[in-house]
Image: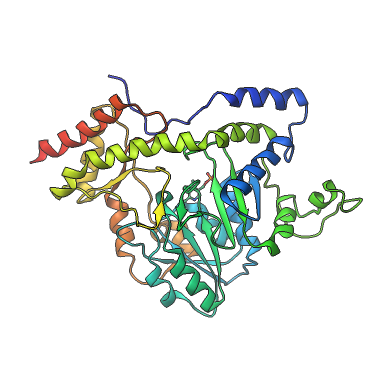
Amino acid sequence: MTNIPFNVPPIQGRELEYLKEVLNSKKLCGDGPFTKRCHLWLEQKLKTQRALLTHSCTAALEMSAMLANLEPGDEVIMPSYTFVSTANAVALRGAIPVFVDVRPDTVNIDENLIEAAITRKTRAIFVVHYAGVACEMDRILEIAKKHNLLVLEDAAQGLLSTYKGRALGTIGQLGSLSFHETKNVVAGEGGALLINDPALVERAEIIREKGTDRSRFLRGQIDKYTWVDLGSSYLPSELNAAVLLAQLEDSESITASRLKVWNDYHTGLKDLEAGENLRRPTIPANCTHNGHMYYVLTKSLEVRTELIEFLKSRGVSSVFHYIPLHSAPAGRKFARAHGTLRHTDEISERLVRLPMWSGLDAAAESRVLESVHDFYRSRS
Ligand SMILES: *Cc1c(COP(=O)(O)O)cnc(C)c1O
């Protein structure tokens, strides 16, 4: 019995051709032709003012926090049920992540809890589109407008997902994408910052180029470049951009393949939800998603632990995440929770992710579905 891995990166074939082109060009550093083609692809496909490749989504999130001018003591509202990078970006500025609970249906930040967490120190709302399914952006934008806050999107999981027809990452002032090996479209390590507010474009270029105006220099707008602001090195090499371009060009078919698996899982597990054994994901009516993740919610931590073990014995890899940030050691030190985070705590104990990758075939799908059914049959 071969093992069904949890994730397999979707190598398309053209990556090697593009990599050879870069190597033969003898220009390996960042912002060459492949990076530019990725920028153009993202700008046209997602409809954003400016896209800038970064070496990770973490880097794009850090750039967002810098562009938001966060200062020590400022507060940023976000979910606790997220990857560490969302909170780190804020804490690295000396600002304080303020966690509010998630919705039990989408596992996204509960928009109805945001306003009560706003103080004189609040500067931004950092939303995370969990599993590539959008947060309730209309309500969040309305709250942000009323209180003069920025909306920053962690769209690490959201490439090609939409909210009311708009691409995730293009709705707030700034959006961050990830092309890490575990995401839908990969560069090994990689990310992008989407700059939706034209007023932030020039400074974003400067921050990404070590605090220099090198981008203006390269465009011939100035005759020498110099240190003009804070910054770091956030750009990827052309090698990463070459791999990424091959992936972006095939991103529609990669997404379609994942969605097929997602839909088959969803249909195949309907009976177990009806029998109140587990809960399936919820996709709100105004959202399209990208099949980034298929998860189920078990009844308890004990059942989840047993299910993961059972699947493992059948050669099916499944994983759980996240340890809520508010209860993590650094979360207690650098952040605070607003209110009780009941759903966050509960979901973090009950959520389990099934194998999901582009190209997961019908035989593997069946084995996953049969194994989950066998597990619940063995318990009844
Ligand atoms: C993957 C992920 C990140 C980090 O992405 P990297 O590209 O690995 O830095 C950040 N936030 C969320 C929600 C993620 O899923």
Residue toward you, 91 or 135: 135
Residue at (46%, 49%) from the top-left corner? 161
Query: Quick check: 207 left or right of 114?
Result: right
Looking at the image, can residue 159 be seen?
A: yes
Looking at the image, can residue 188 be seen?
A: no
Residue positioned most to the right: 223
- Position above or below: 216 against 353: below
Residue 67: image location, x then y, percent: 65, 62
In the rendered image, the quadrant that contains the C terminus is: top left
Query: What colour-coding does the image apply?
Result: rainbow
Residue toward you, 32 or 76: 32
Number of numbered discs on residues: 0
Residue positioned most to the top: 1
Query: Quick check: 4 left or right of 272?
Result: right
Residue positioned most to the front: 165
Residue 73: image location, x then y, percent: 57, 72
| Location of residue 170 (image quadrant) | bottom right
In the rendered image, the quadrant that contains the N terminus is: top left
- Position above or below: 156 against 140: above
Residue at (72%, 39%) from the top-left corner? 30
Residue at (79%, 50%) from the top-left corner? 215
Residue positioned most to the left: 380
- Position above or below: 209 against 265: below
Residue 122: image location, x then y, percent: 53, 74
